Amino acid sequence: MSARTANTDGAPWVDPRAEPAEPRTLASCPELIGSPYTYGQGEEIYGEGEESEFVYRVVSGVVRTAKVLGDGRRQIHGFHLAGDLFGFETSNAHRLNAEAVVATRVLLFRRRQIEAVASRNVEASRRLWDLAMRSLEDAEEHALLLGRRTALERVAAFLMTMEKRLGGSGSVELPMGRRDIADYLGLTLETVSRCISQLHSDRALALSGARRVMLDLGRVGRVVEE
Amino acid sequence: MSARTANTDGAPWVDPRAEPAEPRTLASCPELIGSPYTYGQGEEIYGEGEESEFVYRVVSGVVRTAKVLGDGRRQIHGFHLAGDLFGFETSNAHRLNAEAVVATRVLLFRRRQIEAVASRNVEASRRLWDLAMRSLEDAEEHALLLGRRTALERVAAFLMTMEKRLGGSGSVELPMGRRDIADYLGLTLETVSRCISQLHSDRALALSGARRVMLDLGRVGRVVEE
DNA sequence: CGGGTGATTGAGCCCGCTCAACTCTCGTGG
DNA sequence: CCACGAGAGTTGAGCGGGCTCAATCACCCG
């Protein structure tokens, strides 16, 4: 997962703890103006292998980035929320695909423009490095989860993370379905559902509908432990 | 895993396809001179949580970077071979530990020096970004493997990668033991052993000793497929 | 109300884990 | 030169966590 910067407006799935950023510019780089664009729920933003022309910032909504194998197995690498940037590449092609989890507004920045700025401006260049390193940290944490955690731990860790990014005081409205959660956690959707049910019957969380989750942070946290 | 640059000398585990780099300097940055240091087999280079003072380049040998959970479960994130850089952090503390898999010679570069160069030199800064992005790509590939691949596919993919990085014409001498392979692949060492045995009886590879592996690249590749 | 999608729950199976025995290699010393 | 032991690797038997397949349930929108 990757989330750190944030931008706010009235739309759903906006991080409530976000500080308002100046609209349409990238980070604090006034010479970079993004073009607004909107994707519908489930719509593809770019596909694996496609030419990488833009970098995106989420204004509102949620985007998932993923890889899929020939036989359909899918691994979601991250969910990008309001304020998050995604779509960076070193090569000319996207190595992941990106799709809108819900209706999502983004800003598009031309990749070449960003590169031009970075090749003149050390400050901007430094910020790009920081961004890549954060994503790397997230990816390593994700690998630990996928390689060495049980199903229950994965689900608990996921809920804790989403609560931190989207929720407040233990309550979250999950923007994505069980299938997406499963593909992020390296599980099946049935297993995700069972784990949530188990946390429920252990009184570690309460549900209203399938999406709205109220966590007992202490108990759920104790499942993850370390 | 992360490997891209390389340096050569007579020691074991040196990538045979490496082009010679000027000794003691980082990448092509003549103002950065590294201090040579040697670690014995199994020796810790730095621990998780320790202050991050240096960045390292492997001259010869192999280093593993890993995270371990409270109960001892360990996830290895990468093996660093001759020429590879490791030890970069954004914060002041290491988020992983690093240990020498075999006796390993490294060059140490002061982190603050690198940061100083990067804050003056856009070129160097750009190279740091590239490096981080490569690591990110590796980490994402790793996550796909951990989340969505079977044991046999993981082992096959691992052997293919190691052959590419260390071997030639299908033959590799694995520098790490089964336990390290298992902790990299999110498996147990018994499962790794069984998968290698299976590939052996499927005539996809030949062994001489446990470490020297001769791959039938076509057959092993067919196991990974995509 | 009925249809459709997404979530939950159940039953049974299988892949990979656990525990344990055995083998192989290699270094060391009698 | 062989005996021995230690560490690493292999193999076997049995278990169990998570998967598969399938039925049921909940919740929207008509």
Image (tube, coloured by chain):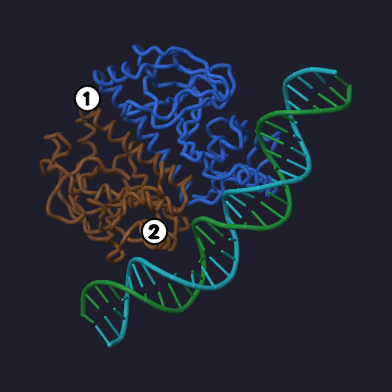
Chain colours: A brown, B blue, C cyan, D green
- Report the residue marked by disc 1: A122
Question: Amino acid type of disc 2?
Answer: Leu
- Spot occupied by residue B180 in the image (x, y as percentages of width and height): 56, 36
Q: Tell me, yes or no, whether the two marked residues, 2 and 1, touch with CB atoms within 8 Å.
A: no
Name the residue: 39% across, 63% down.
A201
- Spot occupied by residue A24 in the image (x, y as percentages of width and height): 12, 43
In this rendered view, identify the residue nearer to me: B64 or A71.
B64
Q: Residues within 10 Å of mark 2 (few under 14, many from 20)?
A: many
| Residue A56 placement: quadrant | top left
Q: Chain of mark 2?
A: A
Q: Is residue A124 left or right of residue B147?
A: left
- Spot occupied by residue A72 in the image (x, y as percentages of width and height): 44, 58
Q: Is residue B161 left or right of residue C2?
A: right
Mark number, residue B126:
none
Q: Is residue A58 above or below residue A131?
A: below
Q: Is residue A140 left or right of residue B150?
A: left
In this rendered view, identify the residue nearer to me: A24 or A164.
A164
User: Can you see residue B60?
Assistant: yes
Q: Is residue C1 left or right of residue B87?
A: left
Mark number, residue A199:
2
Q: Chain of mark 1?
A: A
Q: Secondary structure at mark 1?
A: helix
User: Can you see residue A48?
Assistant: no
- Spot occupied by residue A78 in the image (x, y as percentages of width and height): 33, 48
In this rendered view, identify the residue nearer to me: B91 or B220.
B91
| Residue A143 placement: quadrant | top left
Question: Amino acid type of disc 1?
Answer: Val
Q: Residues within 10 Å of mark 1 (few under 14, many from 20)?
A: many
